[in-house]
């Protein structure tokens, strides 16, 4: 199984990017071809053999990753699976790529693998980095309903069948959109605790657009993918959860602004999932109302 890797960068973490590239090069097994996408910025110096694509503007996380996918041919067809890695992450173990190859080879319906993200200093995995509701034990691998955007592997046949990441999302929930489409097409997603990406502990709200994008894209996600009766239920639950978390007045204002924007702007093509997919998500512990 031939692997590629897509890394997007804003060019502002050259040391971390170089360390990540070195950790990819150190993986056991066949060489992984790497494409680094400069998302509206020049790409720092990279080792020989690493391909670069420099975009004139920032297309956001899904847009930048989609450009990286196409660098491997239509829907990434030149390779069997693609690793998507944050540019300030690092693969501390040298067998991660081989574990990916083995997992995909052993299960032909496995479409996506979500890695475990751990802080390099403490080894702690944040609860939000375990892509399931029962997240207390990050060391437990399981079948899941979504995946982590900067630490995963995707079989390129999934991209060819269901399409790329939703570029208009720019930031937030693009992984769940792809995951729901993949699950609806019959693919499976695994969270693997033994496939680790080191990444410093951070808060998602560090991004200035966080509250607006999270709310807008949540609405788009529902409008694009859910059967009509579930759309108000899903969005009502998330509004309640947001209020219970008691965000600041400024954050709440941005959230409601994004929520309104999600209704007033085009969400892209609507392809509601089958009811049997709703049941599959429910059986996996994540009904698509939360």
Image: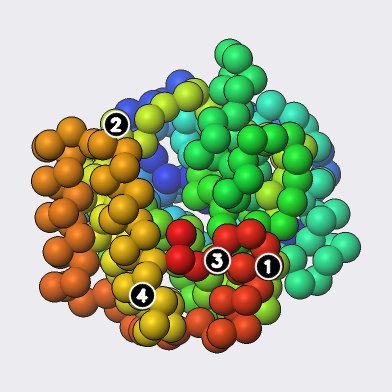
Give the spatial CA distance, label 1 vs label 2: 34 Å
The residue identified by callout 1 is 283
Give the spatial CA distance, label 3 vs label 1: 8 Å
For label 2, the crowd category at 10 Å Cα-Cα, with few meaning under 14, some 14 to 19 and many 20 or more, is few
The residue identified by callout 3 is 287
The residue sitting at 62% across, 83% down in the picture is 276
The residue identified by callout 2 is 206
- The answer to whether residue 109 is visible is yes
The residue sitting at 49% across, 23% down in the picture is 200
Give the spatial CA distance, label 4 vs label 3: 12 Å
Give the spatial CA distance, label 3 vs label 2: 29 Å
Q: Label for residue 231? A: 4
Disc 4 element = helix
Residue 186 in percent (x, y) is at: 67, 78
Q: Say which label, 4 or 3, has the lower sequence index.
A: 4
The residue sitting at 50% across, 39% down in the picture is 128
């Amino acid at each position: 199984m031939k692997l590629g890797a897509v890394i997007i960068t804003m060019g502002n973490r050259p040391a971390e990017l170089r360390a990540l590239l070195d950790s990819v090069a150190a993986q056991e097994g066949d060489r992984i071809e790497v494409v680094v996408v400069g998302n509206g910025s020049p790409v720092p110096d990279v080792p020989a053999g690493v391909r670069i694509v420099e975009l004139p503007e920032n297309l956001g996380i899904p847009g930048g990753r989609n450009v990286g996918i196409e660098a491997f041919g239509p829907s990434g067809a030149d390779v069997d699976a693609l690793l998507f890695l944050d540019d300030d992450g690092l693969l501390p173990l040298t067998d991660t790529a081989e574990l990916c190859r083995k997992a995909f080879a052993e299960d032909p319906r496995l479409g996506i693998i979500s890695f475990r993200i751990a802080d390099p200093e403490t080894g702690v995995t944040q609860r939000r980095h375990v892509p399931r509701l029962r997240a207390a034990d990050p060391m437990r691998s399981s079948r899941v309903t979504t995946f982590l955007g900067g630490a995963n592997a995707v079989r390129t046949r999934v991209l060819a069948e269901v399409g790329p990441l939703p570029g208009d999302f720019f930031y937030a929930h693009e992984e769940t959109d792809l995951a729901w489409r993949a699950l609806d097409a019959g693919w499976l997603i695994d969270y693997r605790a033994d496939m680790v990406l080191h990444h410093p502990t951070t808060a998602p709200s560090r991004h200035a657009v966080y509250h607006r994008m999270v709310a807008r894209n949540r609405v788009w996600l529902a409008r694009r993918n859910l059967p009509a009766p579930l759309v108000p239920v899903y969005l009502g639950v998330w509004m309640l959860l947001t209020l219970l978390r008691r965000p600041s007045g400024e954050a709440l204002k941005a959230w409601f602004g994004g929520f309104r924007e999600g209704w007033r702007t085009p969400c892209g093509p609507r392809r509601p999932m089958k009811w049997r997919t709703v049941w599959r998500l429910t059986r996996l512990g994540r009904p698509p109302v939360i």
